[in-house]
Amino acid sequence: MTIDQYLFALFALLTCGGAISVVICQNVVRMAFSLIISLASISALFFLLSADFVGATQLMVYVGGTIVLLIFGVMLTSSSALLQIRTSPAEGFLAAGIGVLFLSVFSFTVWSVDWDRNQAKLAGVTAVDVPPQGYNEASSGNTVRPLAMSFVGLRPDKAGKAPGYLLPFEIVSVHLLVVLIGAAYLARTKRRVSAES
Amino acid sequence: MSLILAAESLAEIINSYAECDASSVAIAAVIHVALIGAFFGLPAGIFIWAERKVSARIQDRLGPTRVGGRFGWLQAVADGAKLVQKEDLCPKDADKPLFRIAPYVVVIASFAAFMFLPFTDGWSAVSLDVGMFLLFAMLSLEVIGVILAGYASGSKWALFGGMREAAQMVSYEIPMSICALIPIVMAGTLNLNEVIHYQSADWIGVIPPFLHWNVFHPVAGPAFIVYFVCATASCKRAPFDLAEAESELVAGFLTEYSGMRWSFFFLAEYASMFLVSAVAAILFLGGWDDGFGIVRALKGNSTNVLDPGVIAGNLLGAGVLMLKASKLVLIQIWVRWTLPRLRIDQVMTTCLKYLLPMSCALFLAAVVYPMALVLGTGRPQILPLSNDVPAAAEMSTSSEVEVERAAADGEVT
């Protein structure tokens, strides 16, 4: 086994362990901490796959953003009813059923892939080593410009043949705008009607 | 970032002597970790001592004078020895596992961000195309440890401190990131070392190279000030130290901590002070570029890492970066002991009503400014370009033309 494989085993274990302890824990803040471990390990798995940008986004959005908001929200509204979550047996059965269904779908998908054939295919794709571009090289350029270009719908790296990501990007931004307006509406101070009027 | 690749070049050097692949990778990784550990721990110790001396100077005292001879320069070591001996307390009402783990979260987040710092040209543990993005992602994790500490202490002071800290760090992160984006947009890369390359230049006639630093750019200059204010706030330094306001909250989220766990928070605070200052130096003050072309002259065109000229240039560059970052840390210390603490509503007003619109306007200006210059003067910058920069500029414009052509093709098909 190479170091990569050991690290993969470690982070995969941490991911699963964190996820399981989210389910087992009853205290919301401990759940959030387990979720942090799980999500951060997922980003470590992305780094192992050389998907730096996805891993960094995972850290920034989920661990640094969502979880902080979650803990913050829990602390602002901290009351004993919210801090301890108890599930009824019916909910447990329902969740377990859905979980088993998901697991079976995933395992079916994983086992139906012919890994040996795909190994050769993947090696062919990932072996193309694109040298990093920079100002100190004669072939200087911009390191993240292709990514930004693809977000506004241009694919210079694929000679304009592949589709860009303009539509998903716009949908996400409109969605975020809706969320922002909703949050502002919920958070605004509601004027109290005085008792006399 | 294959984690192995992080140690690649050093591993190759070791490999050329020892010819054992796996162990040379391991040795290189250990050297990397030890070096970053040194850069993480040493500045923290030095700045704790500097903070004591500077604050004493400002308050007309002497500060530490005895430990280690004349200037009390061993004070940080003595403090550490004292803190190690202290009892590790855990309050009865605390959430014990979280209470114990919170200091480590803060230290690890701060330490991990050091991985992406280019200490000099090519000397970084992990050189990434998205280094800047990942560095800010790591920095944003620090707040989790503080919130956990605030919650898990089982104390009202700590809870209030943690909540204030969360509100403050989450809101100051926004203008800080937008200001950090300005040099990124100007250089067109998220790789920190490339941002420095963008700012380093040779002498052109009588124009000294340091005029190419972003801080002398009409848009990025003000952005540097906004960035530095936000960076000070994100390190929870006075005048933004609401999270541990002694006069109101005892010590905020630190109230229940003692001994080593308490000192971990301080280690992380001073280390991240140094980190944000180093990032400011890299983004706006030219990083390892000394401003008079000495590093570039020493390095020449040699690509061999073990060339004496390259090593000398790299060492000088590392010293220059350390000097710039230390100066900025000293400014943070100076500000802390000069200005009074803001109220929490003033802190939020400063961020959301002033710094955030300022950073957005500056970002817009940074994008529009080169276009306006091109319309007015035909060139994207005022300074004359040096020998290798025009090649880069031409390359990018030609690639843009290709992009437009490709886009036109795409529309046609």
Image (tube, rainbow, N blue to C red):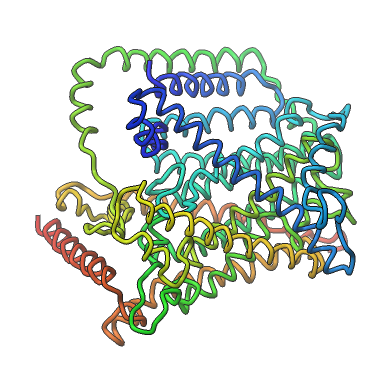
Judge whether B387 appears above or below B132 on screen. Answer: below
Determine whether, in the image, residue A70 is placed left or right of residue B24. right
Q: Residue B114's x, y, as percent?
A: 54, 46
Point out the image quarter for the C terminus of chain B: bottom left
Q: A128 or A109: nearer the eye?
A: A128
Quadrant in the rendering for residue A18? top right
Q: Residue A159's x, y, as percent?
A: 14, 52
Determine whether, in the image, residue B352 is placed left or right of residue B311. right
Q: Residue B247's x, y, as percent?
A: 90, 56
Residue depicted at x 65% and y 39% = B107
Residue depicted at x 49% and y 60% = B282
Q: Residue B334's x, y, as percent?
A: 74, 67
Q: A151 or A88: nearer the eye?
A: A151
Residue depicted at x 34% and y 35% = B12
Residue depicted at x 71% and y 36% = B103
Number of marks drawn: 0
Quadrant in the rendering for residue B333? bottom right
Judge whether B12 appears above or below A135 on screen. Answer: above
Quadrant in the rendering for residue B358? bottom right
Point out the image quarter for the N terminus of chain B: top left
Q: B365 or B131: nearer the eye?
A: B131
